[in-house]
Image (cartoon, rainbow, N blue to C red):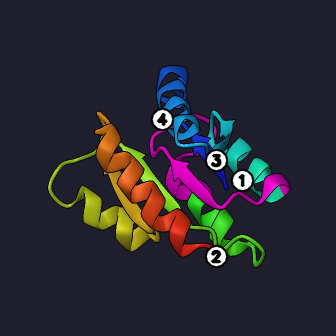
Amino acid sequence: MKILIVDDDAKNRKLLKAALQHCEYETIEADNGERAVRIARENMPDLILMDIQMPVMDGISALKAIRAEEGMKHIPVIAVTSYAMKGDLEKFLTEGFDSCITKPIDIREFIEVVEKYIKGSK
């Protein structure tokens, strides 16, 4: 199973990658939303983990671009964000994200959420 990690912070990508590779998932990475859309199109991942606030193209705009493409609209996209104020999580679900994980990451919870969506896509 292939998971696209999208985050402009290299340390965050490294943490997520290490956790996912420990569980034997294949990972690919993008450092902004624009690259994420291109890489998703080229690689058709089974799941996308998307940061919200990034340069070039933010996570919400990238999500809309992914959902607009017929071949990619079925891919689950999980927001991974430090925005955790009341109402933020609901907003991301309303925008079209399948789920939301808040930073700092709780690795156990993170893997549970990932596995829920990976198992659902088989």
Where is residue 121 shown, x and y percent of the image?
A: 59, 72
Task: Name the residue located 58 percent from the left edge and 41 percent from the top edge.
Answer: 6
Circle on res. 74: 2
Where is residue 57 shown, x and y percent of the image?
A: 61, 44
Write down the region rendered in magenta: 42-62
Tell me the kind of residue under disc 1. Answer: Val
Mark 4 and mark 3 lie on one chain; the one further toward the N terminus is 3
Q: Closer to the camera, 80 or 56?
A: 80
Q: Real-space Cα distance between discs 4 and 2?
A: 24 Å
Residues marked 1 and 3 touching at CB (< 8 Å): no
Circle on res. 88: none
Circle on res. 37: 1
Local SS, label 1: helix
Local SS, label 2: loop
Q: Nearer the viewer, mark 1 or mark 3?
A: 3
Mark 4 and mark 2 lie on one chain; the one further toward the N terminus is 4
Q: Real-space Cα distance between discs 1 and 3?
A: 10 Å
In the image, residue 3 sits, relative to residue 104, either above or below, namely below
Residues marked 2 and 1 touching at CB (< 8 Å): no
Residue under label 4: 19
Left or right, 27 with respect to 43, comes to left
Where is residue 10 shown, x and y percent of the image?
A: 55, 22
In the image, residue 49 sits, relative to residue 18, either above or below, namely below
Q: Residue furthest right?
A: 42
Task: Name the residue located 79 percent from the left edge and 50 percent from the top edge.
Answer: 38
Tell me the kind of residue under disc 2. Answer: His
Q: Real-space Cα distance between discs 2 and 1?
A: 14 Å
Residue under label 3: 4
